[in-house]
């Protein structure tokens, strides 16, 4: 299996380059076909890990760490790989139809580089390569946000670019301090070296790494760039970056927290949880008050990211918190892609990006509304969705440690999520202001509807296959 690992990186790079050479707007079929192969490889990796054969390591060019580059896979990285391909494949089908009339010039090359960066990031095993891959993901995402070329999209992309450069600069400075202290950037080599008695420079480096990655994850109060970027981009772009990109920097925080900086993590464990709780409450409240559909879903992302950071004070030998975080990543990625895809259909059908503008769509777009509702079930944490299993595990881990404050935050976040989801559903069942039925070309929107529905169903089904996912997360934990 180790010889397959580089192909998860090379395949998207190859089709992204081919799409660039083919010219503006070209490469959709190539992207869809190759991503299907990538999904098969990701599942094959997960099955091999689940069989107990151990975590595969591929030494690029035959040179291993510390001089060469190692690609390493375990249960957590396999889960992110599956999520990346599982979200990208239907969204590429969606984008091919969505952009049929006027495809943005460089959507397919940028999307390919984003997927390649995501795959390389979760397989990388040293701090500097993680920086390089994180930059590829971030810059590709900025390019996708700016792709529409409107004043609002360009302004949002510039804010996003500033945030990602600030976060990357802090991360790179932290890496430099770690290298200056220990002479290596290999995670495996650093893990036994960094201790509670580490030099002050290493403690400072850990703080820089944590804050820089929080900025890139859009954790409260570093979230200001996310709502305009995700809420202003075209629907396929919003779905792709909201489902995947913010997970990349969270994945790195979790890797560092469980690896080299585990000894320091105990000191700073409360900070991510406090900011996560604030993100849940503030992001949910802003979503409740949002007047635009895409702004509502974007603020929902700010809130849902908060759940990921509640796990840090709860991480322990029982792995409940780790399992909760992994399930939340998977369920939220699928549900958020489905929700943005559904909103894209609603905007295409009504011509309006307003919550009040969806009145009457229940009669003409029931499948889209059902997909939006199913995604909302996952975000609310209702059974049998993956979101329910994630929040159940999080509550169980909190109760074992007597953290009733976290339990209250989780329940409050679920109630607020129900409020903003039902705002849209209620409005959709109201009559149009003029009392006339909406006229919608269902045939043109059919593929978009079914793609959104498939993503929403997947966010429910992961809850029904929870045991297999939790076993996978246990590999290498």
Image (cartoon, rainbow, N blue to C red):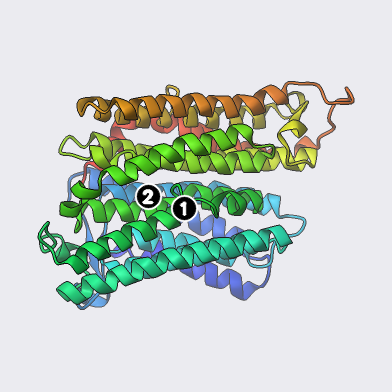
Which element type, helix, strand or loop, lies under badge 2? helix
Earlier along the polypeptide chain: callout 1 or callout 2?
2
In the rendered image, the quadrant that contains the N terminus is: bottom left
Identify the residue at horizontal 79%, vertical 38% (top origin). Answer: 350
Q: Is residue 189 left or right of residue 390?
A: left
> Between residues 361 and 163, which one lies in front from this camera angle?
163
Q: Is residue 321 left or right of residue 244?
A: left
Provide residue 391's location: percent of width, then percent of height. 37, 29
User: Which labelled disc corresponds to residue 209?
Assistant: none
Position of residue 411 relative to residue 49, above or below, is above
Task: Assess disc 1: are there few (<14), some (14-19) or many (≥20) residues with their C-alpha within 10 Å of its C-alpha.
Answer: some
Identify the residue at horizontal 39%, vertical 48% (top origin). Answer: 82
Provide residue 248's location: percent of width, then percent of height. 40, 55
Distance, label 1 to label 2, CA atoms, is: 24 Å
Q: Is residue 90 left or right of residue 398?
A: right
Do the numbered discs 1 and 2 sit on residues whose CB atoms are within 8 Å? no
> Between residues 173 and 18, which one lies in front from this camera angle?
173
Identify the residue at horizontal 75%, vertical 43% (top origin). Answer: 348
Task: Write down the quadrant of residue 394 in the picture.
Answer: top left
Residue marked by disc 1: 222
- Does residue 66 appear in the picture of this structure? no
Provide residue 277's location: percent of width, then percent of height. 39, 37
Which element type, helix, strand or loop, lies under badge 1? loop
User: Which labelled disc corresponds to residue 80?
Assistant: 2
Q: Is residue 144 left or right of residue 457?
A: right
Provide residue 128's location: percent of width, then percent of height. 31, 71
């Amino acid at each position: 299996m180790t010889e397959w690992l580089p192909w998860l990186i090379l395949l998207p790079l190859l089709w992204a380059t081919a799409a660039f050479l083919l010219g503006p707007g070209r490469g959709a079929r190539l992207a869809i076909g190759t991503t299907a192969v990538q999904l098969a490889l990701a599942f094959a990796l997960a099955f091999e890990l689940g069989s107990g054969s151990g975590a595969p390591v591929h030494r690029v060019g035959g040179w291993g760490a510390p001089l060469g580059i190692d690609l390493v896979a375990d249960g957590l990285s396999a889960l992110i790989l599956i999520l990346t391909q599982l979200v990208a494949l239907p969204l590429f089908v969606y984008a091919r139809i969505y952009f049929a009339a006027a495809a943005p010039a460089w959507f397919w090359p940028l999307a390919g580089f984003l997927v390649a960066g995501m795959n390389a990031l979760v397989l990388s095993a040293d701090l500097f390569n993680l920086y390089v891959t994180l930059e590829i993901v971030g810059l590709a995402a900025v390019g996708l946000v700016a792709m529409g070329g409107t004043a609002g999209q360009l302004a949002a992309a510039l804010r996003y670019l500033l945030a990602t450069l600030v976060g990357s600069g802090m991360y790179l400075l932290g890496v430099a301090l770690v290298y200056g202290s220990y002479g290596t950037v290999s995670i495996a080599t650093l893990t036994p070296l960094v201790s509670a008695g580490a030099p002050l420079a290493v403690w400072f480096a850990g703080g820089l790494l944590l804050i820089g990655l929080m900025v890139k994850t859009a954790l409260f109060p570093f979230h200001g760039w996310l709502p305009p970027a995700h809420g202003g981009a075209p629907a396929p772009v919003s779905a792709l970056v909201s489902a995947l990109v913010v997970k990349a920097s969270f994945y790195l925080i979790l890797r560092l927290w469980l690896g080299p900086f585990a000894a320091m993590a105990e000191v700073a464990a409360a900070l991510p949880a406090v900011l996560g709780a604030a993100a849940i409450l503030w992001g949910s409240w802003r979503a409740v008050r949002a007047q635009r559909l895409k702004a509502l879903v974007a603020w929902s992302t700010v809130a849902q990211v908060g759940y990921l950071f509640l796990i840090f004070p709860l991480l322990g030998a029982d792995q409940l918190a780790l399992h909760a975080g992994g399930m939340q990543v998977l369920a939220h990625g699928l549900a958020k892609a489905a929700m943005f895809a559904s909103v894209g259909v609603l905007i295409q059908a009504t011509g309006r990006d307003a919550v009040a503008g969806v009145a009457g769509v229940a009669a003409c777009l029931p499948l889209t509304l059902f997909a939006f509702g199913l995604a909302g079930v996952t975000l609310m944490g209702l059974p049998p969705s993956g979101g329910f299993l994630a929040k159940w595990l999080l509550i169980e881990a909190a109760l074992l440690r007597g953290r009733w404050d976290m339990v209250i935050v989780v329940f409050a976040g679920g109630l607020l999520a129900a409020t903003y989801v039902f705002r849209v559903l209620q409005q959709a069942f109201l009559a149009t202001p003029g009392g006339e039925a909406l006229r919608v070309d269902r045939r043109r929107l059919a593929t978009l509807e079914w793609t959104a529905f498939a993503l929403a169903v997947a966010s429910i089904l992961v809850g029904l296959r929870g045991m297999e996912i939790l076993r996978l997360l246990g590999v290498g934990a």
